Amino acid sequence: MTDASARAAWRGRLVAAAALLLLGVGLWWWLRDDDALNVPLGVEQAAIVTYGGPPLMVKPFKWGVGVNLRIAQVSERDGLRVYDIRYLANRAGTFDLKDYLGSEDGRPLEGLPSFRFTGDPKLSKDLETRIRETEPAGVEIGGYYTVTLWALAVAWIGWLLLLIFYGRPKPVVVAPPAPPPTLAEEMRALLTRVEQGTLDATGAARLEMLLLRAWRDGLVPADAPMARVLAAVAAGERTRDALRTLQHWLHRRETTVTREEIAALIRPLAQPAASAPRPAPAP
């Protein structure tokens, strides 16, 4: 046998041994029963124990005990008692349920089957999926909580709208200011008071100012000072006699000027402006 063939045979034996080792590990992993032995910590498990001896009870709780258990239900079948036991592992380790059970009358538990399990601190993926599928994720609150919140929200919004809009004063509509009276309108009002003899000092001053304003047209500009206006009106041919009459009536106690003469001065200015004549129709 050459060295090459020897090396090839040796390599073949190594490969065969490795294959057998992997096959053995795979079979061990496949045949092991984790669910029957390992239980996650803090998750309640169930076990059914059938026993024909004295009635079972849970031993009194001790601080630091590795397993908590309770008997959820007891039934009888074929003269034997069937116990539905719920247990929970508190720490890692291997435990036996029969170590936490005792008889109600204190007799020894002969023939009680052993139920061994191991507390596993790791939560398996299958168990995590089972918890997620079976336990409701939402939080349900009774007593019409959501409806009550909606009703309170609607009531609060309605109350706020009432505070804002109920009894709110309506906006005040400001009427446009009335146009000032025309010269003719003021003169008609003063003429009535002169004819009735009810013209007071304020009205007399207003009458004098309006007559001077009307008489200055064509004599001086509108922005001329009062002294110039008086001088121009007193010198004007059509206004000097009227000004003298007015001043005698206003400023002299004993005057011979009558109310009818003053009314005659006012009356031409109290007439409304004549409307423009309509053009004659074409022949």
Image (spheres, helix red, strand yellow):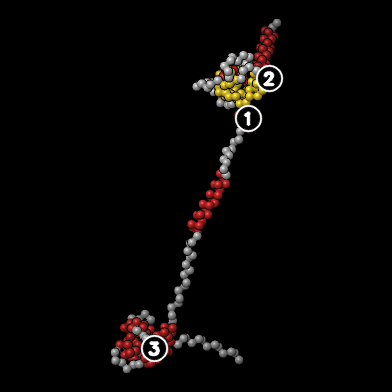
- Location of residue 76 by image quarter: top right
Q: Name which residue type carries label 2.
A: Gly
Residue 4 image offset from top left, x and y in percent: 68, 9
- The residue tagged 1 is 130
Real-space Cα separation, disc 2 to disc 1, in angstroms: 35 Å
Q: Decide: marks 3, 1 in contact (CB < 8 A)?
A: no
Residue 57 image offset from top left, x and y in percent: 58, 21
- Mark 2 secondary-structure assignment: loop
Sooner in the amino-acid sequence: mark 3 or mark 1: 1
Side of 243 relative to 68 (left or right): left
- Mark 1 secondary-structure assignment: helix
- The residue tagged 2 is 79
Residue under the point 36% across and 80% down: 223
Residue 199 image offset from top left, x and y in percent: 36, 85
Sooner in the amino-acid sequence: mark 2 or mark 1: 2
In the rendered image, the quadrant that contains the C terminus is bottom right
Of 277 and 60, nearer the camera is 60
* Mark 2 neighbour class, 10 Å CA radius: few under 14, some 14 to 19, many 20 or more: few
- Location of residue 214 by image quarter: bottom left
Q: Is residue 211 above or below residue 62?
A: below
Q: Which mark is residue 196?
A: 3
Q: Can residue 259 be seen at all in this image of the molecule?
A: yes
Real-space Cα separation, disc 2 to disc 3, in angstroms: 136 Å
Q: Is residue 220 above or below residue 51?
A: below
Sooner in the amino-acid sequence: mark 2 or mark 3: 2
Q: Is residue 11 above or below residue 140?
A: above
